[in-house]
Image (cartoon, grey):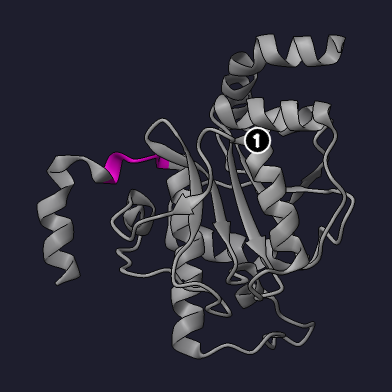
């Protein structure tokens, strides 16, 4: 409990410190939990290459694998949870920590690798999110949200498999701080040692899914500024 007390009282300072601690660089943190947490182990390697090539974002190349009790959670404003099957419930203390993480500015991106409605992973995730955000449950993210125009101007969500034509999310303030995809968005990046894509996907759909992943990262970094009125005329003209 002493550790929880320290975390809760200094969390704002920790998030600010984390940016300096990492030299102002983006870090891809992934949660290690009791289930099959590492379904797309090389996705970040491909994403980092694409992110560096297409944007000016400075990154830390190594993926950061952490648990909820790891102090580095609070040095990691962007957290990825992925899987393809059900997993054990988080403890009450773990729920408290991850709830505070979200409430104080952390963003969680969740990706269901199974590509199936009602999967075991889906059921476990919904149960977890209901405990983290009971007052702001998962809702469909509208295609007008800033997430779809944070870098690329997108009109629809995508993924390796289109399980849903929408993503879901929980809002804290004006921003979705939990984003949930059931479309195996990370699966479009996986390649074998010969450089061949492991999982089948239409080329155009793969490209749209890659752009969607970049948008989510930029959304985590920039928030909702693209929703400001000053940007709307330009965005509308580009989407025509």
Image point (58%, 79%), residue name:
160
Left or right: residue 136 compared with residue 87:
left
- Measured as percent of width and height from the top left, residue 50 is found at 53, 66
On the question of residue 146 being in view, the answer is yes
Task: Let me know if residue 61 appears in the view.
Answer: no
What residue span does the magenta drawing correspond to?
222-226
Q: Nearer the viewer, residue 72 or 5?
A: 5
Look at 84% across and 45% down and name the residue there.
89
Residue drawn 76% across and 87% down? 194
Image coordinates of residue 138 in percent, x first then y, are 52, 48
Give the position of the N terminus as an image quadrant: top right
From what the image shows, is residue 50 above or below residue 174?
below
Up-down relation of residue 139 to residue 75 (above or below): below
Q: Is residue 56 rendered to the left or right of residue 62?
A: left
Q: Residue at x 65, y 25 (%)?
A: 100
The location of residue 64, given as percent across then percent down, is: 76, 46
Q: Is residue 223 magenta?
A: yes
Main SS of residues in magenta = helix
Q: Quadrant of the C terminus?
A: bottom left
Dot 1, crowdedness within 10 Å: few (<14), some or many (≥20)? many
């Amino acid at each position: 409990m002493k550790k929880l007390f320290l975390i809760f009282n200094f969390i704002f300072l920790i998030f600010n410190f984390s940016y300096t601690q990492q030299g102002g660089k983006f870090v891809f943190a992934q949660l290690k939990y009791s289930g099959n947490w590492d379904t797309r182990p090389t996705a970040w390697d491909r994403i980092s290459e694409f992110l560096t090539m297409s944007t000016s974002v400075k990154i830390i190349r190594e993926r950061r694998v952490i648990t909820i009790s790891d102090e580095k959670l609070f040095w990691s404003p962007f957290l990825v949870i992925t899987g393809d099957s059900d997993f054990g419930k988080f403890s009450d203390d773990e729920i408290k920590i991850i709830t505070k993480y979200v409430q104080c500015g952390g963003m969680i991106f969740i990706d269901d690798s199974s590509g199936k409605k009602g999967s075991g992973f889906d059921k476990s995730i919904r149960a977890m999110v209901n405990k983290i955000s009971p007052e702001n449950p998962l809702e469909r993210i509208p295609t007008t949200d800033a997430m779809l125009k944070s870098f690329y101007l997108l009109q629809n969500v995508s993924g390796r498999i289109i399980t849903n034509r929408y993503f879901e999310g929980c809002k804290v303030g004006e921003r979705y701080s939990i984003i949930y995809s059931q479309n195996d968005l990370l699966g479009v990046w996986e390649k074998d040692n010969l450089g061949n894509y492991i999982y089948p996907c239409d080329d155009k759909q793969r490209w749209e899914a890659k752009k969607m992943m970049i948008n989510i990262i930029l959304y985590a970094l920039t928030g909702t500024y693209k929703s400001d009125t000053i940007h709307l005329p330009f965005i509308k003209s580009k989407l025509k």
